[in-house]
Amino acid sequence: MEASQFKSNQYVKFCPGCGDHAINMALQKAMAQIGIPPHQTVVISGIGCSSRMPHYINTYGFNTIHGRGGAIATGVKTSHPELSVWQMTGDGDCLAIGGNHFIHEIRRNVDLNICLFNNRIYGLTKGQYSPTSPKGFVSKSSPFGTVERPFIPAELVLGARGTFFARTLDVDMPTTVECMVAGHQHKGASVIECLVNCVIFNNGTHSWISDRELRAEHSIILRHGEKMIFGKQKDKGLALDYSQGVIPQIIIVPADDPRVLVHDATLQDPTLHRMLALMGQDTTSSSQLPIALGIIRNVDTETYDFAVNEQIHQVRQKSAVQTFDQLTTTLEQWEL
């Protein structure tokens, strides 16, 4: 299939330079690679800049209310498990008013593909701080700097027993497409955190990794089965240091050090995945650990939608009542 088949006829209204343009194009490319036709695909969103996506993708779509995309997506996938269901959401829509729906669709492991656009700002409402804005961030709603500690989406996903988490950059389309395709192949709730730039209200929020000159030293793309090596010269690796106490720490070692870790995204125990996902989140830290991009966790377990439909099937098999007519004519009745 061609990416153009998933491009709608609607004019794209993202601001010029907005990172959402790249995610829109990446999603079209990913859907073409996946090969499921538009009429068997649904894109669901809440409210926000990212939530315009159902208008720009040539599939079935539903632009719901603020924070409720997850509830609608859960219902669509559970009632129609044959559909490919995508949820487009942002750091405000998903992690503030929609936070409760988000953690439960993760906990239930609904077979959804969730793209979480993280620009660390409320863009559509013109520049208020969001749940992922760093502490001290000055915005229209925090003129003296926010006093709140931000959510780290990966930490929230893993805390809710998430089975798939990936992170990517708006300026790295190949990795974004790769993560989206893998997220769809995963059976369960797949969360792809897309680090995007808001050129109007939070320009350069990810510049320490999105800048081409800085990216190789400040980030590492994790791939299952490959050594954790990064740097402009591919001369650095990640290893575990057990010398600081009971809890090991991730450290940087030379790339040829035998201690360099090989990434295993399928580990059932999320401890190492959490450590990797939290790297590079504190840009003021002296540890200089790179931020992890790519597929960090990819674990198989039963999905909510399968379990619900299997339960319905089993109950129907044992029940004498199979239709609504049978329900109204064969059981005890009352006349009013």
Image: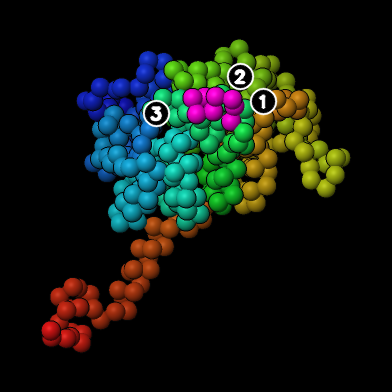
Q: Are dots 1 and 2 in contact, CB under 8 Å?
A: yes
Tell which tag, 1 or 3, sits nearer the viewer. Answer: 3
Main secondary structure type of the part rendered in magenta? loop
Sequence-wise first label, 1 or 2:
2
**Residue range (magenta):** 139-146
- The image position of residue 181, as x and y in percent, is 43, 36
Residue under label 3: 125
Residue lying farthest left?
Answer: 336
Residue under label 1: 283
Tell which tag, 2 or 3, sits nearer the viewer. Answer: 3
Spatial CA distance of label 2 from label 3 is 26 Å
Q: Disc 1 marks which amino acid? A: Thr
Sequence-wise first label, 2 or 3:
3
Q: Disc 3 marks which amino acid? A: Thr
Image quadrant where one finds the C terminus: bottom left
Residue under label 2: 208
